[in-house]
Amino acid sequence: MKVDWLIVGAGFTGAVLAERIASQLNKTVLVVDQRNHIGGNAYDYYDENGVLIHEYGPHIFHTNAKHVWQYLSQFTDWYHYYHQVLGVVDGKQVPIPFNINSLYALFPKDYADKLANQLVEQYGFNVKVPILKIRETAQGNDLKFLADYIYQKVFHHYTLKQWDLTPEELGAAVTARVPINISRDDRYFQDTYQGLPKRGYTMLFKNMLRHKNIRLLLNTDYQDIANDIQCERMIFTGPIDVFFSHMHGELPYRSLRFNFRHTTQDLMQSVGTVNYPNEYEFTRITEFKHLTGQQVAGSTLVEEYPQPHVHGETIPYYPIPKDEYKALYRKYQAEAEKLKEKVIFAGRLADYQYYNMDQAIARALSLFEKEVCA
Ligand code: FAD
Ligand code: UDP
């Protein structure tokens, strides 16, 4: 078969690039995915009880990038939603990111007042401070106690479960994703634009890929068809180390096992996600109906069990943000550079970057302008 562009992966990175190339350049595109569906890790579907669920874990769209929001809004309307998370600390469910409301949920009012005043005095109001920074800089016995308390009860064990590493062993940006919020804002994300595609992610992807220049080939590993496709250029969004047959060794990823369970009760939790930093082997439980606003009898929830990634057996979900792995990734990047006239590498797995959806989309849109159109 002959096409202008071959794109490996029908997740956000691949779908955005396919849509842009087909609609803006009027070139033909073949999108190949090894899975039996489009959408990559954002794929959703109605389970046997009619509940819209996310097969690869809960996905909440949030961004400050107006151009990303506007781009996606061509293909979907939105269910406007602010994600809320509670974490179980000392038997109580308290707001996460940890904020002033969490203090009042955990401590007697007088002591919470004292801690809140000291936090505001030292750091200011309505600011976000990563836990590792608070631990380094907290002044006075009360704030030092608080920093250690939050570290131990919210971050330490959760991070060990999720990554099998301590917060200090990971890049500081990982725990900084969920900073201490010196405010009363209980939202998990504070981005300007937030929501879920009104008719689901899969429908959003269908709308993006519905173009006469785009052909889709599912259930197909790119390696099985590589020799049968003639293309001018290719975009690869799978794991970069797999593309190069692990020639420099395997890049480590973290994987997850999902346990879905259905209940006839209409809602089980008071918010979308409850985190369990200290108890159980799973890290969190998410109840989809909170995220989607779906009105249907019964409810489906998912527990996330982190696990090591084993090539060929589990799914590589998370690149592991650690300096030594970045160094290994750079070796693959150097290999990619040698192929740059023919192949573009992009996406969470090909860039080995812990991208949120909006970052993957922003990267794809910018690649289109800078490298595809150039
Ligand atoms: P992917 O979605 O992984 O797509 C890559 C595709 O390539 C896959 O479909 C794969 O099957 C295919 N592929 C790989 N190799 C081959 C091959 N050899 N041949 C054929 N096909 C191949 N982001 C948010 O913004 N908000 C959230 O709430 C959020 N929650 C998340 C929760 C979890 C549990 C996880 C794991 C991620 C979450 N993310 C979230 C991140 C989000 O999933 C990613 O940003 C996004 O999926 C990146 O898109 P991508 O196209 O780069 O990669
Ligand atoms: N984290 C934590 N406790 C929490 C929430 C988050 O320790 O209650 C840490 C943990 O290391 C996690 C990271 O912060 O991996 C980022 O959390 P986020 O919710 O952004 O993770 P993701 O949704 O990407 O899995």
Image (cartoon, grey):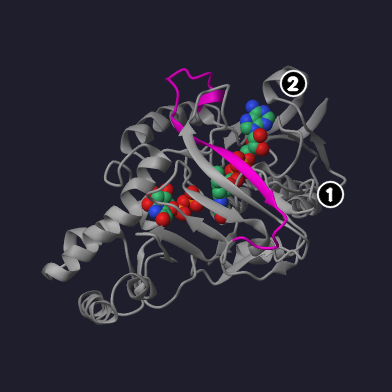
**Image location (x, y in percent) of residue 198:** 74, 64
Q: Position of residue 288 (x, y in %)?
A: 65, 57
Instruction: Examine the rendered structure and indicate whether residue 110 appears above or below residue 151.
Output: below
Name the amino acid type tagged 2. Answer: Ile
Tell me the number on the disc at residue 225. Answer: 2
Secondary element under disc 2, as helix, strand or loop, is: helix
Are the residues tagged 2 and 1 within 8 Å (C-beta)? no
> Looking at the image, which residue is at 65% across and 63% down?
267
Q: Does 104 sit left or right of 244 as displayed? A: left
Position of residue 316 in the picture relative to residue 79 (left or right): left
- Give the magenta range: 241-268
Q: Is residue 372 visible?
A: no
Report whether residue 312 is seen: yes
Real-space CA distance between mark 2 and mark 1, rounded to the nearest whole angstrom: 23 Å
Residue drawn 37% across the image and 66% down it: 98
Amino acid tagged 1? Arg
Q: Would residue 156 be found to the left or right of residue 303 on screen?
A: left
Nearer the observer, 10 or 45 = 45
Tell whether 141 sits left or right of 224. left
Whether 246 is among the magenta residues is yes
Question: Which residue matches tag 1?
Answer: 210
